Amino acid sequence: MSIVPNTNFNFPISWDEEKIKAGTYTLNMKIRLDQENWTFTKKFYVTTQEAKKMNEKAVDFEDTDHATIYKLLVGIVLIILGSLIYLIKRKGRS
């Protein structure tokens, strides 16, 4: 990647599909060009509002609604139990 001095740009950082949380972070950047090396360290704070905005914009992030999963599992269990009770009662009548 080539840039000119004093250039600002957004550098993508992978979060491995995890939500970013509010808190203090430290950026450690090393830049190499031919025989020259630069290091840059900066601490920054992410507020709750900023974290929420970043998580909404994340393209690859899939938010899992655990309540929906639990409701589906309970529904499946109830259907299985209902079917078993029906079969047991039906067999008892025969």
Image (tube, helix red, strand yellow):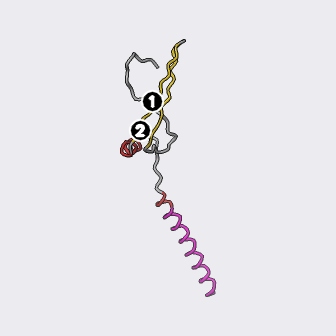
Vertical side of 73 occupied by 35: above or below: above
Q: Would you name the residue on which mark 1 appears?
A: 42
Vertical side of 46 occupied by 74: above or below: below
* Of residues 92 and 38, the one drawn nearer to the viewer in this rendering: 38
Residue drawn at x 46%, y 41% as measured from the top left = 60
The amino acid type of the residue labelled 1 equals: Lys
Toward which corner of the image does residue 92 lie, by quadrant? bottom right
Residue drawn at x 43%, y 40% as measured from the top left = 59
Q: Would you name the residue on which mark 2 appears?
A: 45
* Of residues 93 and 51, the one drawn nearer to the viewer in this rendering: 51
From the top left corner, tell me how far across and down residue 80 is, in percent: 57, 71
* Of residues 78 and 24, the one drawn nearer to the viewer in this rendering: 24
From the top left corner, tell me how far across and down residue 18 is, in percent: 49, 44
Vertical side of 68 occupied by 85: above or below: below
Q: Which element type, helix, strand or loop, lies under badge 2?
A: strand
Residue drawn at x 45%, y 39% as measured from the top left = 24
Disc 2 residue crowd, few under 14, some 14–19, many 20+, Cα 10 Å: few
The span picked out in magenta is: 70-94
The amino acid type of the residue labelled 2 equals: Tyr
Q: Main secondary structure of the magenta part?
A: helix
Q: Which element type, helix, strand or loop, lies under badge 1?
A: strand
